[in-house]
Amino acid sequence: MQSQSRLPANPSRTGAKGFGSLIKWREKMIVCVAVVGHQNNPLYVQSFTDADDALKLHHIVHCSLDVVDERVNNPKKSGPTLNETFLGMLYPTENYKVYGYLTNTKVKFVLVTTDLDVRDADVRNFFRRFHAAYVDAVSNPFHVPGKKITSKTFAERVSNIVKSFGLSSAG
Amino acid sequence: MEEYPEELRTPPVALTALVGCPELHAPITAHLHAEQPPINALALPDFSKISLFARVTKESPAPGRSINGILKRDWLSKHRTKIPAVVAALFSSDHVSGDPAQWLQVCTDLENLKGVIKGRNIRLVVVVVTQTSSKDDISSEDRMTSLRKRAEIDSKYIIVFTPNDPLELKQSLNRLRNTLAELANTYYRDEGRQIKARLEKKNLSSVELQIRYSFKVAVFAEFRRDWAEALRLYEEAYHVLREMVGTSTRLPPIQRLVEIKTVAEQLHFKISTLLLHGGKIAEAIMWFHRHIDTYWSLVGEPDVSFLHWEWLSRQYLVFAELLESSSAAVQNVSSAALSTSDKLTEFEFSSAYYYQSAAQYLKEKSSCLELALSISVNSRELDENEESAIPAAYVGQFVKLLERGESLTTQPLTDEEFVHHSLAEGKRFQDSFEIIALFKKSFEMYSNNKTLRMASYCGLQMGKEYFTLNEFNEAKQIFENVTNLYRKEGWVTLLWEVLGYLRECSRRIGSMKDFVEHSLEMAALPVSANASDNAFKDSGPAGPPSLPQRQMIHKEVFGVVRGEVGFSSNEDKDELRVTDGHPLYLEIDLVSPLRIVLLASVAFHEQVVKPGVSTMVTLSLLTQLPLNVEIDQLEIQFNQSECNFIIVNGQRPQLAAISNVQPGRRVETAPSLEIITNKWLRLTYEIKSEQSGKLECIYVIARIGPHFTICCRAESPASMNDLPLWKFEDRVEAIPIKDPGLAFSGQKAIQVEEPDPQVDLILGSSGPALVGENFIVPVTITSKGHSVHSGELKINLVDTRGGGLLSPREVEPFSADNLHVELVAISGQDSQDQSDASSEGIKKIQPSFGLISVPILNEGESWSCKLEIKWNRPKPVMLYVSLGYTPHISEATSQKVHVHKSLQIEGKSAVTISHSYMLPFRWDPLLPSMAKATKDPDPSPILPLKETSILIVHAKNSTEVPLRLLSMSLETEKDGACTVRQKDEELKEPALIVPGEEFKKIFHVIPEVNLPKLSVGTVLLRCKRDWGHGEQQSGSSCCKATEVLTKQRLPDVSVESPPVIITLVCPPHAILGNPFTYSIKIMNKTHLLQEIKYSLADSQSFVLSGPHNDTISVLPKSEQVLSFKLVPLVSGVQHLPRVTVNSVRYSAVFHPSIAASTIFIFPSRPDFKITDRAESRVESVVVE
């Protein structure tokens, strides 16, 4: 493909505002993060939108598990290493991108973002911090493994990580 | 994709035309079409039709004039179907070489044709059709030349076509085809080049022209099958078009955008087709994404936003179809492409993803259209003036068609009119079925790929669409499929949504049971309390998943099941109610999703109980419903129905009287039967069973209200699964029973034991059994409180090692001979009993199993029988004897009581037999093979032929009981190969052998035949147990010792005829100082002269006379004696001088054994008292 075919992205958004639920300002932000357990059961799903699309985000996270399964079952031969936890982009949907991460204990992290030009490095960084937060949360002696994560500290920490997403590389 | 015109969808095929000689057109067109690449041909029967190709005169666009559109609608189809690249003019050779009139006609036609095609640069081929292949016609040669000149073509474009001969025809066709292909290629190249030149001048008046020219060049390149060039120009056109978006002002804004999008769609379609055709799937997908990204946000005016979504949906649909058809062709491309491009994900290679998106955007279009229609004021007028717009001459434009009297004229539309027209068009179509079809397609593809979650999502969308269409039955079916996955994986919010739809569907259909089930499940779902209502607004009819909503549903459904509230479906006004006529019955089993609504755990406090003794049973109920539930009545059902009982709610006495209480049933009253959310309701009652066996709680049936029943399968706390969905919640988990031990081990079943037997079963054992004897085990049954009725005695012999029944090795066929141990007989106490038993009919004996009926025994009586068991091989065996009886004759149904006894019995061989061979004293045959094989550690014995050898047979008592040996004999083979001399077989009196003792008997064996393997015979040994003197009499009556015959075949021996026999002759003893003769007899048994070397060593004990060493020859069949005179010098046991005899022929050396060369020297003549006792003694002796 020629490089020039990448068209300048300057859609006339003025006309697009407010019409149809699909059209929203494509803000560069994380709209949903999720922790999914061994039986593909949700352990923690949190959306970060003001809109009423939480259910839709749940659907997106759920569907993305299909890709995780496929990646895990048919690992790419040219894949970097066996222990790579970052699964990369799972699939693009209408106006979201979904990224996945698989811990060594086979717990899945899913990230849904509206930033269509997000950089892999940012996502990796996000997952790394998120993983650390998760590990701290489940290391709590009062947490029962396999149950939903209800810790408020965890929620706060995740919220901070989400807010700071992409800031380091802004510009 | 179907809505695109044919010429756009299919790759361009070069077009040619045939004129004249219509009879040949059919084979030519068929041939052109069949070859690769195909060529289409227009067949014009005669030259008058050629004006079709004529260029319509039109003024070329003046530089200043504005361009009306981007692409002309009919341009492509014109080149595909109307304007040929090459015209083949077919003339008959008769006409060419015929009379001047015909020739003139040919020339005129050619001129006309030339005139027409010149304007379009169409190439010309002249085909002369001859009937014969011979070219003898000279005049035609001239005519041909002039024809060529008139046609102004190269001579290679004049083709002679010979249709008559098949071979010639084929050649002619190929020639024509190649020429046509070549010329068509030139034509398209030149046309393309010409337009390209215009394009490259860069002074084009408008971008529209730039796009149009690029498109045309690309199409011509496609005609030439130059895909790369075509792709490049399509892309260029596409990019130029994109730049038009902000700049063009030619049309009113809405239509402007519509036109651009329509053209972009066409260009993109071409690009995708080319990329996919070239196998560049990843590139095609990336191109598609860019295409979508570019236009995604170009929604346009809000009034017609639905047009945008429709357009977008079409992009996805078309791409999905392209991808599907191309990936069907190349199956494994996706995996290959996957590895190359990391940017793309798995889904993007599956067309299902695009179908799904197409459906999604179509749905969006549908909703936008609805909105637009509702806003539009004059929606009614929409239907009235439909004539208004038709597609214009340019792609993506519409014009108004006006009738002005006879003539029709067109007029550009204003945007208002266009919107009006679009709305009217949009109204005519029902999108829902299209949406469902797309989702269904995607659903099926995902399902086939085992991409279940995506499939579920598509299914859900499909169900929702059916729901909006009020097709509740279809919707319900689809939703029900979807719920399974969400339940399994615990996605509660998603499940909530689906259940909400299902509940609504059930309500609309009027299915009360489903409505109640779904409502109950929803009410019991663990939806997170912290989810803000706002975020889940679009959760369908269920409302947001929240605790208040659950409580609302709970209240509603319990109103319905108690019959207090009616249940009305919207469709008919009749209210359904839970009443007498319509009771409601729900069943909850171990896998039901309703386990979260009511979970019943039942545990007995003990594992075993005696019949008639009461034990405790605890019933625990748990619910996750958000509000407390009051149960009116509980019924506990067991597999023994007489144990069933009912618990009524003490607080609702009026309801406690409700039905279903069978007379005589146990009824308990509980102070309260209210179940609190996530809190076990525990009820403990006594229970007593009279019947032995298993007592298991099966159902716990809860009745709420007069007509509502929940039948809940009882579960054991020990093996209870976690609650589905709730197991992931962070909640307080209590154990069903207060006692934690019971909570982890309690079972819903209890074993009710048999009553204790009051009968003794005694197995009399008497030591180990001997192999071969009929071993007798006496069995005695003594009643000690129970009388025995219909008693049965079962006997089993079981291998102690394997545990399996005693059987021969698998490979051996089943026969009694092969059994190691068998049960031979069961004898009763006396003949009367036996006749009783046989008349009652039960007496079965099999080798390892026996069944015998026991007569009726009253209290205190006893009965006995004997089991005869025979061992064929030594083996330990377990004997199991079990007695089953009923204590009371009156109760036919009463329980059987069983008594079991077992006994391990060792089976042993009575004696072990071994043997050895010896030679006579001081008599040594030379056996050459023995001499050679001295190294062999275990040589098989070799006996000298026709000479006496001595066989000693040892019999050792290997049991722990004393035996009496009756006889021992050697049974020889009948062939007389071997003579055995033995004393009489029968012993004069049976020899007593105590355990560990050995009995020996000597036999003389003379092999008569020289065989390599000589069978000596079989040892027969008869013996019996020695019961001692005290038991002799009783033994004869009860335990008559049977004789045991043991047979053992002796191993074969080798026989060899000795060539030389050496005998040492020497007196048995000597006296000090008295000389005696020591002679060595060497006997040559062969027919040959034997050279013998011998030597005699000196000895200090003797004075020796005779030769020390020498070599002598022994004549055939004769004997040589070497004699020495010896005088003993020392008394006592002395060794004779050592003799060495060496047979040179056999190179064998003989040394006499120590025993053979030992002699006792008396100091003086002893005084012997000779008696003759030795003569009378039996040769067999018993030694310690």
Image (cartoon, coloured by chain):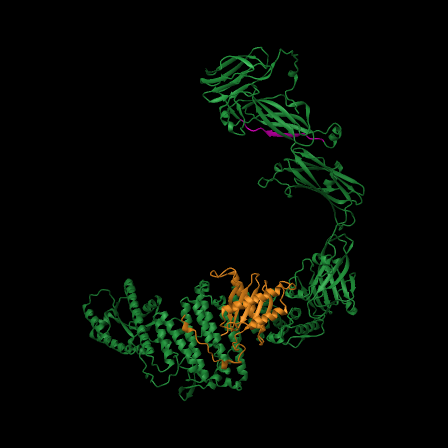
Chain colours: A orange, B green
Q: Is residue B1049 magenta?
A: yes
Q: Is residue B381 above or below residue B1182?
A: below
Quarter occupied by residue B236: bottom left
Residue B410, horizontal then vertical, whole percent? 41, 86
Residue B950, horizontal then vertical, whole percent? 58, 22
Residue B347, horizontal then vertical, whole percent? 50, 67
Quarter occupied by residue B23: bottom left
Residue B288, horizontal then vertical, whole percent? 45, 72
B105 left or right of B233? left
Q: Is residue B801 above or below residue B167?
A: above
Q: Is residue B782 visible?
A: yes
B364 left or right of B16? right
B744 left or right of B306? right
Q: Nearer the viewer, residue B721 or B869?
A: B721
Q: Residue at x 41, y 68 (%)?
A: B277
Q: Nearer the viewer, residue B56 or B1129?
A: B1129
Q: Nearer the viewer, residue B855 or B243?
A: B243
What is the number of callouts on the image?
Answer: 0
Which quarter shows the C terminus of chain B? Answer: top right
Q: Nearer the viewer, residue B1089 or B823?
A: B1089
- Which residue is outermost to the bottom? B405
Which quarter shows the N terminus of chain B? Answer: bottom left
Q: Is residue B1083 magenta?
A: no
Quarter occupied by residue A126: bottom right
Which span of residues is magenta-colored? B1040-1053
Q: Is residue B855 visible?
A: no
